[in-house]
Image (spheres, rainbow, N blue to C red):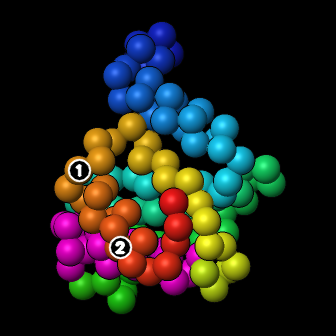
Amino acid sequence: MTVKRYEKNGAVRRARKVRARVKATGRLRLSIFRSARHVYAQVIDDASGTTLAAASSLDASIKSGGNKVGAEAVGKLIAERAVKAGVSEVAFDRGGFAYHGRVQALAEGARAGGLKF
């Protein structure tokens, strides 16, 4: 895929628009990625370019895998790790994915775990 085609890709454009709006808030960013089998989440400090907490459905403590139940468990785990790192408020970066299904389950799990966004 050439660079021009990549930049015109709908998913890439949606992700850029969402990320630009989230970065404008100035908060730490809860970024998620949803693959066909797994769900990944990171709390990122854009000012310093560091990841403060990370969790995924690949963690040994999560038995459900990448389905909605697993996504909710990832949300609770990322919230627990973020609170341990001293983070309580984040901006939710859905990365161009629709707020539905596994993305929504992860967000609700993070809220239940104590993150505010």
Say if residue 114 shows up in the picture.
yes
SS assignment for the magenta stretch, majority: helix
Query: In the image, is residue 70 part of the stretch drawn in magenta?
Result: yes
Indicate whether 1 appears above or below 72: above
Indicate whether 78 appears above or below 91: below
Q: List x then y, in percent, for residue 67.
A: 19, 67
Query: In the image, is residue 81 part of the stretch drawn in magenta?
Result: yes
Indicate whether 59 appears above or below 95: below
SS label for mark 2? helix
SS label for mark 1? loop
Task: Residue at 20% x, 74% y: name it.
Answer: 69
- The residue indicated by pointer 1 is 100
Quarter of the image that includes the N terminus: top left
Q: Which residues are magenta?
A: 64-82
Crowding around mark 1 (Cα neighbors within 10 Å: few <14, some 14 to 19, many 20+) is few
Q: List x then y, in percent, for residue 15.
A: 45, 34
The total of numbered circles placed on residues is 2
Task: Residue at 46% x, 63% y: name it.
Answer: 41
Task: Residue at 80% x, 54% y: name it.
Answer: 48
- 87 lies left or right of 70: right
Going from the N terminus, do you reach mark 2 or mark 1 first?
1
Give me the disc on residue 109: 2
Q: List x then y, in percent, for residue 32.
A: 44, 55
Q: CA distance from mark 2 to mark 1?
A: 13 Å
At label 2, the amino acid type is: Gly
The image quadrant that residue 44 belongs to is bottom right
Q: Residue furthest bottom?
A: 61
The image quadrant that residue 102 belongs to is bottom left
Give me the disc on residue 61: none
- 12 lies left or right of 26: left
